[in-house]
């Protein structure tokens, strides 16, 4: 199947850039978006009205009408307790809870239905001392939360105990921890120090793989044998977890990633490697952003998709630089989520504009 490149919904409501996206657990009906405006929003991307009424494209005289506008998804709930931007989201397998982290130096555990925080892991001498870049559920029945921070540590929290102390602190990283992934007893972390560390918590073992450039993103394959690593040298690498070797590298002369944390994911049933764009090479003329998709096996570029700033009427505001000249603004797409961990038929993307654009197989 071709890479899905047609937007099927826009999700509106954020008053700033969106930094984190997550689908609800299978079947992935809902989308969570964490924003710089300190709020988390729960959406149903299915619009209320049918997208294609029977006579939408053709008038009685047989004239073609312009294609209908991309519909808006529905805002279901807003979750507000953060005092700083939200940078990461993770959803429990039963969809009853989710966790968020960001500039607060605390991990927030939420009850989806009541929109209340159940726990806040932070504010003690044993907590993170700087912004928390990433958080992920782990353990049996999602009993643990794993968080990685600018303070260079990975901390493991027991959701079921009443203690606010972490049950484990992993402090091997020499610089900010940017990404964590959890699989069974294993925790994988990526750091600005250019290394990917795999911890076997049961065995008390840590294996370090040197990537080189600052690591900004991790996405593990379903079988756990390989991990997609994003780094600040304009390359994505698929690494073999057992040997630490690089199986494939994905890059393009026109794709740049040297400054920002762009999230890369595996999608289309692990057929594609997908990432956004810093838009420094070729800024968009109308504030659009760009998605890049490579074939996971051949490394061949399969798609380059322009993503609008938002629906009509949501054009970017004009910015004036220090030299008094208008500055071009692009929709830098920093966060991605693919339904059912890359195996569903839909994905969503967002960034600077604060509008979440949903793509899918029609």
Image (cartoon, rainbow, N blue to C red):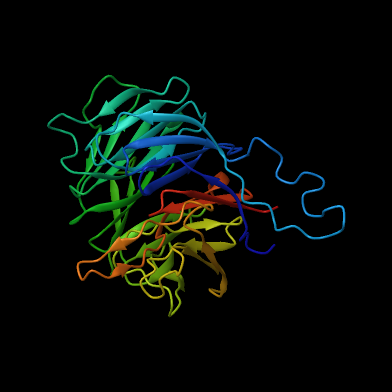
Residue 30 pos. (x, y %): 55, 36
Give 232 or 50, whichever is nearer the viewer.
50
> Where in the figure is residue 141, as x and y percent of width and height?
46, 29
In x, y percent, where is residue 103? Answer: 24, 41
- Residue 185 visible in this rendered orientation of the protein: no
Residue at 38% over, 33% down: 99
Q: Is residue 92 above or below residue 252?
A: above
Residue at image coords 46%, 49%? 355
State left or right for residue 311 relative to residue 187: right
Q: So how many labels did they put on this image? A: 0
Residue in the image at 39% along x and 60% along y: 332
Q: Nearer the viewer, residue 254 or 64?
A: 64
Residue 211, quarter of picture: bottom left
- Residue 192 shown left or right of residue 2 in the figure: left
Q: Is 188 drawn above or below residue 97 in the view shown? A: below
Q: Nearer the viewer, residue 186 or 271?
A: 271
Q: Is residue 317 visible?
A: yes
């Amino acid at each position: 199947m071709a890479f899905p490149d047609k937007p099927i919904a826009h999700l509106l409501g954020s008053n700033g850039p969106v930094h984190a996206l997550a689908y609800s657990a299978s079947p992935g009906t809902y989308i969570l978006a964490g924003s710089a405006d300190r709020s988390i929003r729960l959406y149903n991307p299915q619009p209320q009205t049918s997208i294609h009424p029977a006579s939408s494209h053709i008038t009685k005289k047989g004239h073609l009408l312009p294609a209908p506008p991309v519909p808006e998804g529905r805002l279901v709930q807003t979750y507000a307790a953060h005092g700083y931007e939200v940078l990461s989201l993770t959803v429990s397998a039963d969809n009853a809870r989710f966790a968020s982290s960001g500039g607060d130096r605390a991990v927030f555990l939420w009850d989806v239905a009541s929109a209340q925080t159940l726990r806040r892991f932070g504010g003690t001498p044993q907590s993170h001392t700087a912004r928390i870049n990433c958080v992920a559920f782990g353990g049996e029945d999602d009993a643990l939360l794993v968080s990685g921070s600018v303070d260079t540590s990975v901390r493991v929290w027991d959701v079921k105990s009443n203690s606010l102390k972490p049950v484990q602190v992993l402090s091997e990283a020499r610089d900010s921890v940017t990404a964590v992934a959890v699989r069974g007893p294993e925790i994988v972390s990526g750091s600005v120090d250019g290394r990917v560390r795999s911890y076997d918590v049961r065995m008390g073992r840590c294996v370090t793989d040197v990537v080189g450039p600052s690591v900004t993103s991790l996405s593990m394959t379903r079988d756990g044998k390989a991990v997609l690593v994003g780094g600040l040298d304009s390359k994505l690498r698929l690494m073999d977890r057992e040997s630490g070797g690089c199986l494939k590298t994905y890059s393009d002369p026109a794709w740049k990633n040297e400054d920002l944390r762009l999230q890369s994911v595996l999608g289309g049933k692990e057929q594609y490697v997908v990432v956004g764009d810093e838009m420094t090479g070729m800024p968009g003329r109308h504030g659009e952003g760009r998605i890049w998709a490579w074939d996971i096996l051949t490394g061949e570029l399969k798609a380059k998709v322009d993503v609008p700033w938002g629906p009509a009427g949501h054009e970017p505001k004009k910015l004036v630089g220090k030299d008094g000249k208008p500055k071009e603004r692009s929709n830098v797409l920093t966060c991605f989520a693919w339904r059912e961990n890359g195996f569903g038929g839909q994905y969503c993307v967002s960034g600077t504009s604060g509008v979440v654009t949903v793509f899918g197989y029609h």
